[in-house]
Image (cartoon, rainbow, N blue to C red):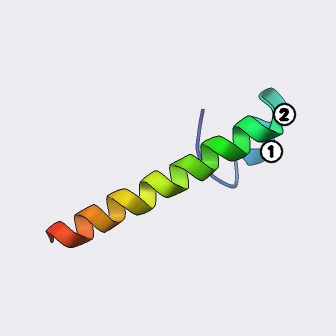
Amino acid sequence: MAVGIVTLPAEIKYFNRRAALLRNGFALVISVIFTLIVWQVM
């Protein structure tokens, strides 16, 4: 499974719409959290 807008149509096709959107949403939230942590450390 990949994360991103480009792969979203394929994820919706192979999984379902809700699962694909939830996965991408969680990935976005986790990415922002990690970005803030790294920003605070540096």
Q: Relative to residue 31, is residue 14 drawn left or right?
A: right
SS for dot 1: helix
| Residue found 61% across the figure and 52% down from its top | 25
| Quarter location, residue 32 | bottom left
Q: Which residue is mark 1?
A: 9
Quarter of the rendering occupied by the N terminus: top right
Q: Position of residue 19 (x, y in %)?
A: 72, 35
In the rendered structure, the answer to whether residue 15 lies left or right of residue 5 reads right
Residue 40 in the figure: left or right of residue 22: left
Instruction: Please say if the residues under marks 1 and 2 sit with CB atoms less than 8 Å apart.
Output: yes
Name of the residue lying farthest toward the left = 42
Count of number-bearing discs? 2
Asked which quadrant contains residue 12, the reply is: top right
Question: Where 6 falls versus 11 (above or below)?
Answer: below
Q: How many residues crowd mark 1 within 10 Å: few (<14), some (14–19), many (20+)?
A: few
The answer for how far apart the CA atoms under marks 1 and 2 are is 6 Å
Q: What label does residue 38 carry, if any?
A: none
Q: Residue at x 69, y 55 (%)?
A: 5
Residue at 34% across, 64% down: 35
Instruction: Give above or below for 26 relative to 37.
Output: above
Amino acid at dot 1: Pro
Q: Amino acid at mark 2?
A: Lys
Picture layout, residue 7 above or below residue 28: above
Front in this rendered view, residue 13 or 22:
22
Residue shown at the point (38%, 59%) measured from the top left: 33
* Residue underneath mark 2: 13
Q: What is the quadrant of the C terminus in the image? A: bottom left
* Above or below, 37 relative to 8: below
Dot 2 lies on which element? helix
On screen, residue 36 versus residue 2, left or right, reads left
User: How many residues crowd mark 2 within 10 Å: few (<14), some (14–19), many (20+)?
Assistant: few
Q: How far across and how far down the image is residue 40, in percent?
A: 21, 71
